[in-house]
Amino acid sequence: MSAFNQEPNILKYKHDLGKRRLKPDERRKQLTLCALKAFAENGVARATHSHVAKLAGVAIPTVHSYFRSREDLESAVLCEVENYLIKLVTDSLSGKKSVEEALTTLAMRFANDATTKSDIIKVWLDWSTGVRAGVWPRYLALLDKLHAITRPVFLRGKREGILSENLNVKAATRLFIGGGHTLALMQFAKVPSRDLAIYMDQFIQSLMNIGKP
């Protein structure tokens, strides 16, 4: 199970654990939570074992015993971010929703999670800028997965006649996921709620009307 079903509160987690000796799975969970925060604060390319150790209140060798290399640490964090985003998109678009309701739900989640799941979204946004980094192919693979989950909603919209038959589904999917990325950035930029709502509404409506006369 993902360590990030809820926004981690590192201090509370450490307090709840007290001074008792942790089981290996508890220690790994603790270190993974701290690694997520370290990557959010220091960046995907710059976070280290020492950052994680400081947040967890443990010695650096303890972190190395669970994540031997920086690549192992990085991979564990990115895996959690991948799993979270895939679940976010899947859950938002599933169920008995109209096309517009499904797209609006996901857009709202992208905006809201920048506040409620800020560490995860910060890592996602930072990861998306690492064009020259070794993690870039993995980011592109994640985008492909998110596009694949989103594509059926646009295909359904075309079948139902809600979306234009001229709509390019592949392009619309890319625009939509990219728009979610922008919504998260706007939230971190502290754009007023009214302006955020206007952007979201116009963004959804523009997608709904692509290709229509």
Image (tube, rainbow, N blue to C red):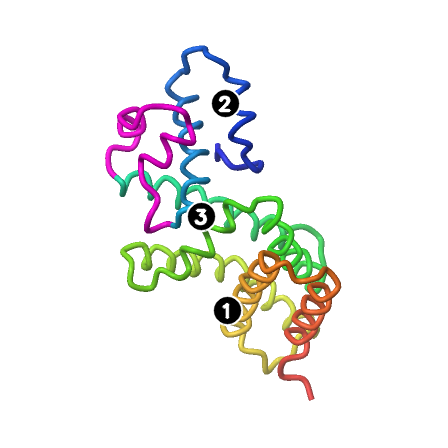
The three-letter amino acid code for the residue at tag 3 is: Glu
The three-letter amino acid code for the residue at tag 2 is: Lys
Q: Is 53 colored magenta in this rendering? A: yes
**Can you identify the residue that label 3 sits on?**
82
Q: Secondary structure at mark 1?
A: helix
Bounds of the magenta segment: 44-69
Q: Is residue 133 left or right of residue 196?
A: left
The three-letter amino acid code for the residue at tag 1 is: Arg
- Report the front residue among 97 and 141: 141
**Residue 121 circle label:** none
CA separation, marks 2 and 3?
25 Å
**Residue 14 circle label:** 2
Q: Secondary structure at mark 2?
A: helix
Question: Which residue occupies 33% across, 59% down?
Answer: 136
Question: Which residue occupies 58% across, 36% down?
Answer: 6
- Report the front residue among 56 and 33: 56
- On the image, which quarter does residue 204 sit in? bottom right
The C terminus: image quadrant? bottom right
Say which label, 1 or 2, has the lower sequence index.
2
Residue 41 spot, x, y in % from top left: 44, 45
Question: Which residue occupies 33% across, 48% down?
Answer: 46
